[in-house]
Amino acid sequence: MAGSKPATVASYAAGASLAAAALIYVFGPTFALDNEAAPSGRKKTIVGLRNGANDCFINSVLQVLAGLDDLRIYLIRETHRRRIEDPAVYSYLVQPTDGAGPLPAWKLHGLQDGLVTYGLKDMLDALNERPIYKKAISPFQLVRVLETAFRQRISRQQQDAQEFLQIVAERLKDEYHAGRRARDHARRHGITPPYVENGDSKGTETETEAETGTGNEGATNNGDPASTAEASTPDLTPTISRKRMPNENEEAFPMEGRYESQLQCTTCRYKTRPREEAFCTLTLAVPQVSSTSLTSCFDGIFKTEYIDDFKCENCRLVQAKENLETELAKSTSDSFRKTAEENIEKLRVAIETNPEEPPEGVDLGDIKYAPKRRIAKTTRMTIFPKILAIHLSRSIYGVGQVTQKNSAKVSFPENLPLGGLMDQRKYKLLGVVTHRGGHNSGHYEAFRRQNMPKPPFAHLNTFQASEAYSKTPTPISTPDLSARRIASPAVSTPDLLSASSGTSSISVNLPLPPPRSVPEDQQVNGKIKDSDSGSLRSVAASTKSALSRLTSPKSNRGSRSGSPSPAPPAATAGKPPKRKKPAADKWWRVSDEKVKESKTSEVLGMQREVYLLFYELDKDF
């Protein structure tokens, strides 16, 4: 028994040392990377994109999209939702009801499967890796996904970055709405069996049919004997699962916004019905001047515009009504008076209800004789997107001339206010795409802000929930797991990420309790009687010292051996610390594979080259 005591203590000391070494090896590099405090002089960088065939228009857009936090969170949530749900939810095709007509089955399948959503998420994840050396990848992976989704080849010649952005953004929006239609259908009617494509349109359903029950599931025989006999035949198809999906408060596609325009006649003061339009990128025309501002470009859309010689529908009905009343007062024919009175009543009802729909059977006369009025056109944004993508149109189209590029300087702010006094929003600049060259050739570059890493794609706290996924329950959701607290056979390692405020070291309470492997007769007041117990204290002290160096890497930068640095001299101790450039002022300037740091003043100075602007909604405003 006496001989086994040193071996027991030695084995415990070896185990504790091995655990401390493992903690240093596992958590040391990650902790230093995430806090960007690596002691080496290596320059920080990001992953670049190779330009194999005039791909700068693709590379610049992807680099900016990789720096948009709200877009990455949306992609994580959307792909996570699709992975954990039953595949049958997206197998049943639900046609849209926006009036554009039914979509082909292959295209609707791609939209509901979210092909581009998955492909873009993988690409942005690869671009947001933290490389320890210069690294560049190819955008061909996403290009191949787009070619599969659209069933056509993307030209690799000189192309427009705005057109590529529009294709990607519109496709993401369509995939979101297609997936939401499929989920809504599953909530109303249960999960349907998988759809088997056989060349016809069976198995598809529109939103209207799903709501009214007139689709494949809700069809009735209407008393037809043949239908009754067919209905009585045993159905050999798979049984439809009536499992209902829970309601979910989904967050919309972050780049989708809406604005509405309305016309008002300055004579009769009639306002037309608002016409609402959705957008993913907002195109602003750059005026042909030497210099202008982004606010002036916005005025081209959202400022009140006056139009002359417009034919107002309400004034036309009023004029027709007044003409009939004049003729009625002069007429002596009973039949004419009766018809005129009926038409006058129809016109009165139409004027009071909806002048844009003239009454049937009433002669309004030739439209070229309709009165011409002056109208005011107003446009306002009704749904502010989380990510506002602005395209500055620099094309100058001349009659019989070659299209030229407008090289006017456009000043743009870092913080952009939008909206009126009651619904004002504030946006922050996160990305810029610039273009150098002429209208038909040139080179694109990207500027993306070095945002502080945020969950869910940064490991600021390894043991903290990311809050990136659905905020409400989803079908077949991942269960919540909780760890059980049990007695550890050895001394528990203190939490690596629970350092007390005001100090960067981790507190370890000594003396340590003895291990359970030590017999009780070898203990006195909870301590080991043998002198070898001092080795346990030395192991704990060394572990504490190593972990303290991990939590405060800046303080030990001057010592390579790991020993604490000496205190600074009294003459230099009173000097203020050197001011570092704030993180919000740091940018990446990316030109394909070339990556270098930039700052806000340089970005705001690209007034002649700016082409695309990406603003993110300030949620704290």
Image: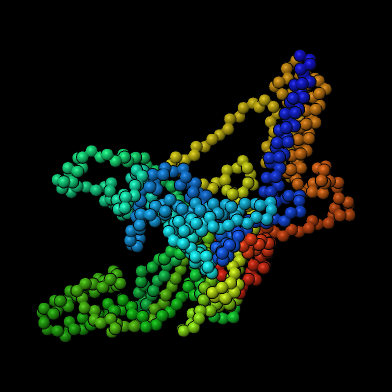
The picture places residue 620, in percent across and down from the top left corner, at 57, 57
> Which residue shows up at 42% across the image and 53% down it?
110
> Which residue shows up at 53% across the image and 71% down it?
392
Above or below, 223 against 356 in this view is: above
Above or below, 425 against 497 in this view is: below
The quadrant of the rendering that contains the N terminus is top right
Query: Viewed as shown, does residue 560 lie left or right of 140?
Result: right
Residue 90 in view here: yes
The picture places residue 38, in percent across and down from the top left corner, at 73, 49
The quadrant of the rendering that contains the C terminus is bottom right
Above or below, 21 against 165 in this view is: above
Colouring convention used in this rendered image of the protein: rainbow
> Which residue shows up at 32% across the image and 50% down it?
198
Query: Viewed as shown, does residue 419 lie left or right of 224?
Result: right
Taking the view exactly as shown, the residue that stands out farthest to the bottom is 330
Q: Nearer the viewer, residue 352 or 245?
A: 245
> Which residue shows up at 75% across the image and 21% down it?
8
Taking the view exactly as shown, the residue that stands out farthest to the left is 334
Query: Viewed as shown, does residue 548 lie left or right of 426?
Result: right
